[in-house]
Image (spheres, rainbow, N blue to C red):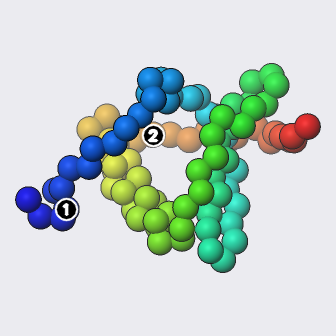
Amino acid sequence: MDEKTKQIQIKAKDEDLKGVYSNLMILSHTKEEFCLDFINTFNPPTLTSRVLMSPAHLKRMANVLEQTLKKYEERFGAITLTEEPKREIGFK
């Protein structure tokens, strides 16, 4: 089995397998890392998850997301975007 097809065994808590809902992502960065904050904007707006990663890993993730989205649209049709309403999100 080569490196690209090697399977990785991971541990996950049952609670984490349920997933969390997010309808907003805020992206920020420094020179060394990117921070992806996933937010549920229903009242009250809540940070549901924060993911930190290196610039190289974010680029790999962006590439695989682009490839996966292309395959999705080839199978199910183009995704049309509507204009997002302007929202003011703040933390207390």
Number of disc labels: 2
What amino acid type should be assigned to the residue bearing mark 2?
A: Ile
Which quadrant of the rendered structure holds the N terminus? bottom left
What amino acid type should be assigned to the residue bearing mark 1?
A: Lys
Image quadrant where residue 30 sits: bottom right
**Observer-nearest of 2 and 91:** 2
Mark 2 or 1: in front is: 1
Tell me the residue that label 1 is attached to: 4
Distance from label 2 to label 1 (Cα)?
30 Å
Image spot of residue 69 (x, y percent): 38, 48
Relative height, residue 81 to residue 19 (above, below): below
Q: Earlier in the sequence, mark 2 or mark 1?
A: 1
Seen as rendered, the residue at the extreme bottom is 31
Seen as rendered, the residue at the extreme right is 92
**Observer-nearest of 1 and 29:** 1
Look at 26% across and 38% down and name the residue there. 75
Q: Secondary structure at mark 1?
A: helix
Q: Residues within 10 Å of mark 1 (few under 14, many from 20)?
A: few
**Observer-nearest of 48 and 43:** 48
Q: Are marks 2 and 1 in contact (CB under 8 Å)?
A: no
Tell me the residue that label 2 is attached to: 79
Image spot of residue 59 (x, y percent): 47, 67
Image quadrant where residue 81 sits: top right
